[in-house]
Image: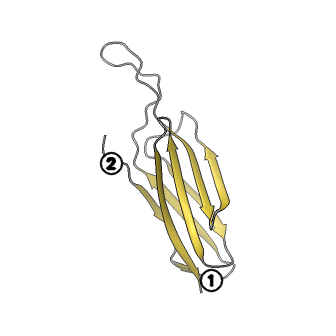
Amino acid sequence: MAKIKPRVKVPKTIAAGEVFPVKTLINHKMESGQRKDKAGEKIPRKIINKFEVTFNGAPVITVDVEPAVSTNPFFEFQMQIDGDGELAFKWTDDDGSVYETSKSIAVG
């Protein structure tokens, strides 16, 4: 499997009180757990099952992802902040793997 690298797009600076978009994409080949390999054995489920975002440690959004999610899940949402800070992003996989990244935003 290729290296899993999350991508996030947020503005570097915003005006105080401005509503802005947050876009995320993680390259991840999902496996539903329903398919079988050449030997007829079920291929174990492997999906991103949780997506979490915090701003300066405070929760922003938490998504419990279900098996119907597509490969390379994309999430987009809007938010608003009053001061500078850091958005932290975390994706959790069925096998316990955690993929994280963060982005700083300045209010100016």
Task: Name the residue nearer the viewer: 85 or 108.
Answer: 85
- 43 relative to 76 in the view: left or right: left
Could one spot residue 83 in this view of the protein? Answer: yes
Q: Tell me where residue 36 appears, x and y as whole percent.
A: 38, 18
| First along the sequence among labels 1 and 2 | 2
Q: Which residue is mark 2?
A: 3
Mark 1 element type: loop
Q: In the rendering, which numbered label is found on residue 7?
A: none
Residue at the (43%, 32%) spot, across then down:
31
Mark 2 element type: loop
Above or below: residue 101 compared with residue 68:
below
Q: State which quadrant residue 64 falls in.
A: top right
The reply to whether dot 1 and dot 2 touch (C-beta < 8 Å) is no
Q: In the rendering, which numbered label is found on residue 15?
A: 1
Residue at the (66%, 77%) spot, across then down:
18
Q: State which quadrant residue 19 falls in.
A: bottom right
Above or below: residue 83 compared with residue 51:
below
Residue at the (53%, 58%) spot, across then down:
89
